[in-house]
Image (cartoon, rainbow, N blue to C red):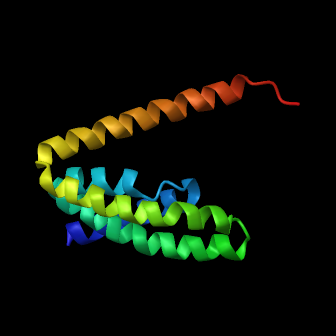
Amino acid sequence: MTDVILGLVIGLLGGFAGGLLGIGGGAVYVPAMVLLLDEPQHSAQGASLAAIVATGLVASVAHLRNRNVDIPTAMQVAPPAVIAGFGGAFLADALGAEVLQRIFAVVMLYMSVQMIVGALRSRRAPTA
């Protein structure tokens, strides 16, 4: 029962983060499932992606209604993203869990540092 409640909380936090920040929730889902639910890395990533599909569809409809989607750009980005998604999934399946976990951690760390540096730079930039 605790895992069910934990899963619901993880879903709420990831969905909220995805909707608010546009991060897709994966930055919340994967570490939370691995650390709190003791899920294997591969399973956590697969479950995260399944949850993100649902979240992405709902968020996309909302953004389309609000005219926040540049459709020509989305049409250019989507096909290669789908192809790369297949490639990434096959590569992830071929890697061991420890290697995949390390890659995930390095990417998360890099993105975090980039976001912090960007926020600090924009804070110092003079406004016109």
Name which residue lies at 35% across and 39% down: 107
Taking the view exactly as shown, the residue that stands out farthest to the right is 128
Q: Is residue 56 left or right of residue 98?
A: right
Name the residue at 59% across, 31% down: 118
Q: Nearer the viewer, residue 78 or 99?
A: 78
Say left or right for 77 vs 26: right
Residue 125 location (% of width, % of height): 75, 24
Q: Is residue 22 in sight in this rendering?
A: yes
- Residue at image x 21%, y 54%? 92
- State the residue in front, 114 or 29: 114
Q: Residue at 54% across / 56% down in the picture?
A: 22
Quarter of the image with the C terminus is: top right
Is residue 37 something one can see in this rendering? Answer: no
Residue 50, position in %: x, y? Answer: 33, 71
Q: Is residue 109 above or below residue 23?
A: above
Q: Percent position (x, y) of residue 112?
A: 45, 35
Q: In which quarter of the image is the N terminus?
A: bottom left
Q: Quadrant of residue 81?
A: bottom left
Left or right of 128: which side holds 62?
left
Q: How many badges with numbers are in the image?
A: 0
Q: Position of residue 27 (x, y in %)?
A: 39, 50
